[in-house]
Image (tube, rainbow, N blue to C red):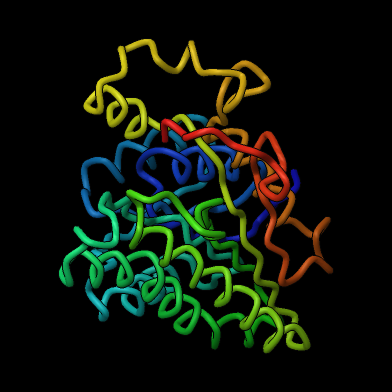
């Protein structure tokens, strides 16, 4: 088991990529801490993991509340006694171009997608130090490099997260604290499946994605992201630090893309 006895918190893990992570982390021996805003959803994921002989608990918290990150970390320590890994996965996907993005939307996007990871890492840092090190994985997006026209605030938040990742990785490397980031491409989560239907695509759209966007015949799944995360959170990646890894089916630089349906 590649994550045996590691206590790992994954934010936004009651659905989508985060849920895929906690389920596979538990299979690999980790004690996972599920995070969400709805207690029933969090308890359901935890109970399901436990039924499969995994170890799991949960914490709740609204990440747009600046007081919440410290309380979440305190909750992990209170229940598990330590924290070995933090995955900043929770994010809000806001639609809107530059002209149509108002201050409230911009501020909330930055608060959840960028400020909350900063505050969570800051709260976890003393515990990492006591233990002689720790792992952080930030879940970004390929939109960090410039982004789509209709995802202005979201793209900015992920670009900022990329700089945060590299800055903290550099600052605390000598203390055994590793900080890395995945810039994730198009991934088939339950929310994405529904969103594309509201935007006019048919219910079976995910089975008919153009090879231009899915050369393998399908887009990424939460499990694809989760297995990559197992490696980066394991002792196998003990010296990997400050890395931003693109999890996509094609190179982002040098590719002539048509207009994306994302």
> At 29% from the left edge and 62% from the top edge, which residue is drawn?
98
* Figure quadrant of the N terminus: top right
Residue 261 at x, y percent in the picture: 42, 31
Decide which of 179, 135 is in the foreground and name it.
179
Q: Identify which residue, 242 or 154, lies in the foreground.
A: 154
Q: Quadrant of residue 28?
A: top right
Q: Nearer the viewer, residue 55 or 19?
A: 19
Relative vertical location of residue 126 with respect to residue 47 in this rendering, above or below: below
Q: How many marks?
A: 0
The x and y percentages for residue 131 are 66, 81
* The C terminus - image quarter: top left
Q: 148 above or below 100? A: above
- At 23% across and 64% down in the image, what residue appears? 62
Q: What residue appears at the point 37 percent right and 51 percent down from the top-left corner? A: 149
Q: Residue at x 37, y 52 (%)?
A: 12
Q: Nearer the viewer, residue 98 or 130?
A: 98
Looking at the image, residue 156 lies above or below residue 93 = below
Picture coordinates of residue 91, whole percent (x, y): 37, 56
């Amino acid at each position: 088991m590649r994550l045996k006895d590691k206590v790992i918190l994954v934010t936004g893990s009651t659905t989508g990529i985060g849920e895929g992570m906690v389920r596979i982390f538990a299979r690999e021996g980790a004690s996972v801490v599920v995070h969400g805003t709805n207690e029933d959803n969090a308890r359901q994921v935890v109970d399901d993991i436990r039924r499969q002989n995994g170890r799991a608990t949960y914490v709740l918290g609204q990440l747009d509340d600046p007081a919440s990150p410290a309380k979440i970390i305190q909750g992990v320590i209170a229940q598990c006694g330590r924290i070995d890994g933090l995955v900043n996965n929770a994010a809000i996907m806001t639609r809107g171009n530059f002209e149509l993005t108002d201050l409230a939307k911009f501020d909330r996007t930055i608060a959840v997608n960028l400020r909350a990871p900063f505050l969570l890492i800051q709260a976890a840092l003393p515990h990492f130090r006591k233990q002689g090190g720790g792992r952080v994985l930030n879940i970004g997006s390929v939109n960090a490099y410039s982004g789509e026209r209709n995802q202005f605030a979201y793209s900015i938040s992920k670009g900022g997260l990329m700089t945060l990742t590299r800055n903290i990785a550099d600052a605390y490397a000598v203390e055994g604290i590793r900080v890395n980031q995945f810039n994730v491409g198009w991934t088939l989560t339950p929310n994405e499946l529904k969103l594309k239907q509201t935007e006019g695509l048919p219910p079976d759209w995910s089975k008919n994605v153009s090879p231009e966007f899915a050369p393998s015949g399908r887009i990424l799944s939460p499990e694809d992201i989760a297995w990559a995360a197992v490696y980066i959170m394991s002792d196998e990646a003990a010296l990997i630090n400050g890395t931003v890894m693109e999890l996509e089916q094609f190179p982002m630089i040098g590719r002539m893309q048509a207009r994306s349906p994302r």
